[in-house]
Image: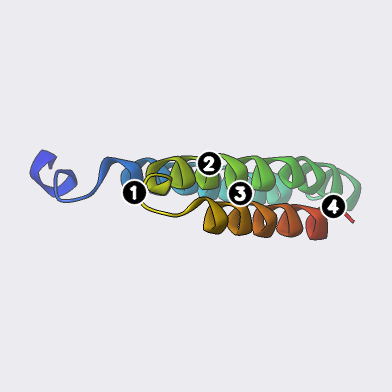
Amino acid sequence: MKSFFSKFDSTVLTMAGLRMLSASIEFSAAIVMLILNDVKKAVIVNSLLAIVGPIVFIITMTIGIFHIADQVSYGKLVFIGIGVFFILFGIYK
């Protein structure tokens, strides 16, 4: 199994691992909603998920940007940062 993971860049593995963790949390929340079988409680569980998504997004983008920072010009990094800001702004507004 170690040879399988050695084929991938460690940064990509970290980013993918965070996304898998996020997906596991989302899947677990769906199961909890089914177990609770109540709309009010399902809305509460869903509202908690609204916190997880952006946090994972910010962390994975930060990891990726730090890894490519030496390969990309400062101007492009500014545009990437502005893009991330607009995505977050769109989510919360």
Q: How many marks?
A: 4
Outermost residue, left side: 3
Sequence-first disc among 4 and 3: 3
Secondary structure under the numbered disc 1 in the rendered image: helix
Rounded to the nearest angstrom, the CA distance separating label 2 from label 4 is: 19 Å
Q: Which residue is mark 4?
A: 92
Q: Which residue is mark 2?
A: 62
Q: What is the crowding at mark 2: few (fewer than 14 residues within 10 Å), some, or many (at least 20)? A: some
Q: Position of residue 5 (x, y in %)?
A: 18, 45
Q: Is residue 59 above or below residue 40?
A: above
| Kind of residue at badge 3 | Glu
Rounded to the nearest angstrom, the CA distance separating label 2 from label 1 is: 12 Å
| Kind of residue at badge 4 | Tyr
Rounded to the nearest angstrom, the CA distance separating label 4 from label 3 is: 19 Å
CB-based contact (under 8 Å), mark 4 and mark 3: no
Q: In the figure, is residue 9 to the left or right of 30?
A: left
Q: Residue at point 72% right, 45% down?
A: 49
